[in-house]
Image (tube, coloured by chain):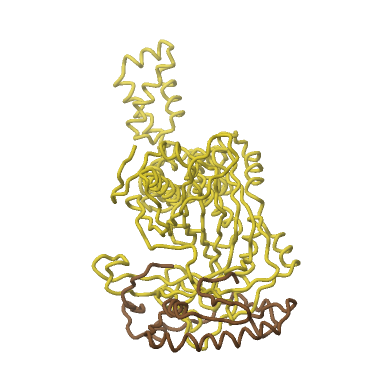
Chain colours: A yellow, B brown
Amino acid sequence: MTATSATGDALLSYDDVLAAYDPALGLEVHVELNTASKMFCGCPTEFGAEPNTQVCPTCLGLPGAMPVVNGKAVESAIRIGLALNCEIAEWCRFARKNYFYPDMPKNFQTSQYDEPICFEGWMDVEVDGETFRVEIERAHMEEDTGKSLHVGTSGRIHGADYSLVDYNRAGIPLIEIVTKPIRGAGERAPEVAKAYVAQLRDLIVALGVSDARMDQGSIRADVNLSLAPKVSAGSTAEAPLGTRTETKNVNSLRSVERAVRYEMQRHAAILAGGGSILQETRHWHEDTGVTTSGREKSDAEDYRYFPEPDLVPVAPSREWVEELRGTLPENPTQKRARLQAEWGFTDLEMRDTVGAGALSMVEETIAAGASPQAARKWWLAELARRANDAGVELAELGVTPAQVAGVQALVDAGSINDKLARQVFDGLLAGEGTPEEVVEKRGLAIVSDEGALSAAVDNAIAANPDVAQKIRDGKVAAAGALIGAVMKEMRGQADAGRVRELILEKLA
Amino acid sequence: MPDTPGAPAESGGRVQITREEVAHLADLARIDLDEAELDHLAPQLSVILESVASIKGVAGDDVPPTSHPVPLTNVFREDVVTPSLTPEQALSGAPESEQQRFAVPRILGDEQ
């Protein structure tokens, strides 16, 4: 069955895609390092600075300026490589990637070509308790590009009258991590892609080498996808890879999953109709969830790479590499097992926590003082639902682990109950300050004024004489109806346990 | 480095660069060469390549290719911020600027 996208692409139904084709994924993830200074000069790397305030002759490519490698960036590159189980090159060079696009003022990007600093690694990715091994082809060092603003009627590249460029970002150290083709994921391909990027992000956070903010572009993913005809079950033969497309700059985890699925359906509709896939880059549109054609791309694109003559080779000593290996954080699989034991989570609870992308938030919430079950409850039940409604990742919702721990502390102290806590989250999301401030501003604290409570209980008894009589006759279970009436009058701001006590005292 | 599509053909010590290869390289480098210039440059570039190729004959298999004349490795700087230019200085050489940014002609291609 075929449907049509908002932009007129024919899309084969997902079930039909899987019946006929095996997807192959390739992911290129760019990680902006959080060094204080740029890759080859001492300019600062602050996000969001005024345009062209973080530039110098070197990153502007002015004549005579000479680059010098930031040692901290090399250290971060090696640590990322080691965490991805890569080999670390004994000797490698930078290379110039020559192209004509004004996002680099030098007319080339300093990158690495056939001598990446890290190569041949792997990462195990978990999807619903199943493990996929993603093989890493390479992780190399390069520099980020400037940001262009296209001026014209459309605001897009095509149709722009001219462009304005800010070079603050040009020269910020980047590590590009490239996977080998990921095959055999089948229907799980979109989830595997998302889980890989999510787990890579968690690893980067644990290493402390990047801000790892997808919304700010400090982690960006390019998604390669191709389809091959499905091989019959039991066959060990692998069909040759199909023609791929590369969807650029997919900037949220949810979009990684959506972009893979979209391209699978689009490719399949073309192939099923007897057509062939054009090897090209595609642009991802977050708002409409579609990809559109970019530029044609051949494998033999000629960037006229050559070794960078202004930089000497990087030759990390084995002693240095081993020293850096000693600084690696616990690997994610071991860490999950340890946390599950510490928190007393069941397998299902742990899987749900990881699946919701809530592991690090739950961990930080517990570290901030909440009990494991309370942390899990808020993130998975309450906040995951809100993130889903808002169409954002949990980490991007805008509530911090410290705030969640703060809300739970108020519950533990008896200041609010779970129901009121949900209103506190409304306030936190509306930017009304700390949990205490939200409680104060919204008047959410539980009324501990015995006089007010007692009056509300009296009102409830007077309004429900039949129920009151039942309780006097010993049917204590009927108290629920009166508690409900009192809570309603108190707008939920009462301790239900205390209300029950008062009712039973008065009707004893 | 792996072979690139623009690399000159080499056979029996004679290095030839064809007119088509020169045209391709000129296109990659965004240099506008007319027919007469291509006719003129192709043989000249062949002579230069031949001269460079003769060095290959001198270096044995035990001599690795050199990309840098100074035998140094691991020249690093500390990750320390140094002062940047002011935006006025940075933009002073730009033919045009707007909104404190470099104004560049309409971009036809795509980001790389």
Report whether A285 appears left or right of A226: left
**Residue nearest the viewer, comparing A301 with A472:** A301
**Residue nearest the viewer, comparing A332 with A460:** A332
Q: Can residue A165 be seen here?
A: yes
Q: Position of residue A372 (x, y in %)?
A: 57, 40
Q: Is residue B22 above or below residue A81?
A: below
Q: Position of residue A96 (x, y in %)?
A: 53, 75
Based on the displayed image, in which of its 4 quarters is residue A371 positioned? top right
Q: Total label count?
A: 0
Q: Is residue A477 above or below residue B23?
A: above
Task: Name the quarter where the C terminus of chain A is drawn.
Answer: top left
Q: Give the residue drawn at x 31%, y 25%.
A: A459
Based on the displayed image, in which of its 4 quarters is residue A37 positioned? bottom right
Q: Position of residue A161 (x, y in %)?
A: 27, 73
* Residue situated furthest front in the rendering: B12
Q: Position of residue A496 (x, y in %)?
A: 43, 29
Task: Name the quarter where the N terminus of chain A is drawn.
Answer: top left
* Residue situated furthest top in the rendering: A473
Report whether A186 appears left or right of A203: left
**Residue nearest the viewer, comparing A372 with A281:** A281
**Residue nearest the viewer, comparing A386 with A163:** A163
Based on the displayed image, in which of its 4 quarters is residue A113 positioned? bottom right
Q: Can residue A424 be seen here?
A: no
* Residue situated furthest left in the rendering: A153
Q: Is residue A458 above or below residue A280?
A: above
